[in-house]
Amino acid sequence: MADNNPESFSGQLSVLVVGLGLIGGSFARALRKSGFCRSVIGFDRQPSSIVKASELGIIDQGANSLSEGVSQADVIMLSVPMLAMEPLLKQLAGLELSGKMITDAGSCKGAFVKSALAAFQEIPAMLVPGHPIAGSEKSGVTAARDDLFVAHNVLLTPLSHTDALAVAVVKKLWEVCGARVSCMEVEHHDQVLALTSHLPHYLAFSLVDTLAGEPENQAIFRYAAGGFRDFTRIAGSDPVMWHDIALSNREAVLESIDTFSEGLNRLRTAIAKGDSSALSGIFERARSARNHFATLLSRRMYMASCKEKMQSLVAGPGGSLCGHLRVPGDKSISHRSIMLGALAEGTTVIDGFLEGEDAMATLQAFRNMGVVIEGPDNGRVVVHGVGMHGLKPSSEPLYLGNAGTAMRLMAGLMAAQSFDVTLTGDESLSGRPMKRVTQPLSHMGAGIETAEGGTPPLNIKGQCTLKGIHYDMPVASAQVQSCLLLAGMYARGTTSVKSPGIVRDHTNRMLAGFGYPVQVKDDTVSISGGGSLIATDIDVPADISSAAFFMVAASIAEGSDIVLTHVGINPTRAGVIEILKLMGADITLTNEQEVGGEPVADIRVKSAPLKGIEIPRALVPVAIDEFPVLFVAAACANGRTVLRGAEELRVKESDRIQSMADGLQILGVEAKPLADGMIIHGSKMSGGTVDSCGDHRIAMAFAVAALKSEGEIRILDCANVATSFPNFVMLAEQAGMTVSVEGSNE
């Protein structure tokens, strides 16, 4: 074989698949179709399966015996029922295996590892336990499909001494089959799979078996609705396989059945007692959790299967904007309304809640901690608060998707709870810095561990006693300030935070709205611990960050005249308005009022010639999220625009300075990235293909740029637009832009 790079094995490997059923046959078929291997050999205890696999083109050749197949193979895949694994491994132990890699597709990794230990006396370093999370109610070699693993997870469970190259090669083989591969510890794998895969199958088997024994069984099955058929479909799965899994993963399966039984008993008790509140809580939590995680899962599957980077936006040149628009609710306020509403005494009603993935992740996290939350229903959410000390431990880490705001603020809240908690996020969030909050929280007495480099996940210890501190922020940050204020509610004494510049004050305003006093003096905000929150109603204003895309669009597109209604114009967020006005934009505010402590207004924007400026440093922190689209405004302005003092843009969802500079240069704009900003010379823009780097704001900014481009702009990697502005394309088309989605999973 070749060197230590698994890519270099392309065309070099011979793979033996032992067991040509649905999984083994599909693995062989997918490998053969990929062309990655030199040959795919098949062996099965049923010679007829080998013949059929050859006839169907599933394998290149069959082996007459296990020893013959092993002698020709570099990698051996074991895909047989769990109870057949140990005798098979004992057979392998008697063969020459020097340099050969072994993996499997069994559902129970603990049992597989025990079988390997019994067979080999010590587990070979070249053995890589694995499990594809894919299947069908059909079985046998004729059911094999080359796309069975596309966009599905495969879990590898290497041991501490497993050879790294073997892991890399097995991972590559699954990837060329279209799977998403990750690693997990053996015990954790069996616990998770018992709940997510094994338990549903046994429930389906048990339900069908129970009802089939009823006197009215014919009527039951004759008139069964679609829900019954959907739920019981998996009862048609291979009984031999599920028999073996039940015995191989016995302890974890029994534990999962006990857990389900407890939940079923809670439901029975609520029905028996006529407890309307308990029933509503169970049903609402289940519905919302199912919808939330289904959205995440479908998005992940889509991203894995897409040949181009996720979804692409295609924006056509030209056009003008007109009419009245209301953009989605403010994301920052939506996050905070859920957090404070959950900790308040009483019921909080939220209108205008942003139903984007980030805010929904926060909502789901508090549901996981026992908070009953109704909705969202057209932006309305009802939160039944549990009080300052009423949160309950989640059985799993709290997944916050791409929501950096949620993670940093919740770090402060979770540091004061009585239970341990882990905060996790997606790939983007997992690479973002968290020391800015974990270090001052540690000074307050919090116990927090991060990944290497100070990034998520955050493992937060419970039962820590926090003490108030004074903290001078090195860089102005609303997230750091808010995190420490939220922790300060639980701390002994007073917590004060001093900022070197302007920061958003949403948390201060909302705490006051919930009846928790906050002191603000000059550049310092203080809070005393030991208070409580009283439920209130919240009307979330439209997000000025979302409105900014249409403000710039209307400014640069000739003949435009739009009104953006009910937009939050908090002075700590409204820097984009001031910057655009300095550039010559025609912007007027009407219907100004205060709603729930937040200033709002209707913003009218007419097209106007823009000029390049040096952006005042004082406005940088109050427009930090709007700079991607402001860079587009600068590219359409006459003259030179200079931004400095915005180094924070380097550590957002992407390096927004470099990502925007790269995209603008592709479109023919002279854009020079600086360590803390950019210099842009306004000019004509050509069409082209740019990469948003998975950053929602960059994707939408380049869609706006198309209004002044000479050709179509194709923007790659746009699935994350849903995190902050789920109906952007619809509103853009409604306003007069030409934007469409390619590769949509809808």
Image: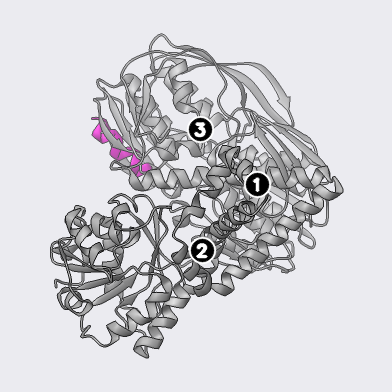
**From the viewer's perspective, is 390 left or right of 742?**
right
Q: Position of residue 729 (x, y in %)?
A: 44, 26
Instruction: Check the picture and name the quadrant holding the N terminus.
Output: bottom left
Q: How far across and how far down the image is residue 195, in percent?
A: 57, 61
**Of the residues shown, which amino acid type is indicated by label 1?**
Ala
The magenta region covers 657-670
Residue type (three-letter) at the residue carrying disc 2: Leu
Whether residue 614 is visible, yes or no, is: no
Q: Is residue 200 left or right of residue 711?
A: right
> How many marks on residues?
3
- The quadrant in which the C terminus is found is top left
Name the residue: 60% across, 61% down.
Answer: 396
Residue contact at pointers 1 and 2, CB within 8 angstroms:
no
| Residue carrying label 2 | 193
Q: What's the residue type where badge 3 is placed?
A: Phe
Query: Which residue is labeled 3 in the image?
Result: 725
Instruction: Judge depth for marks 1 and 3 and give the one in front.
Output: 1
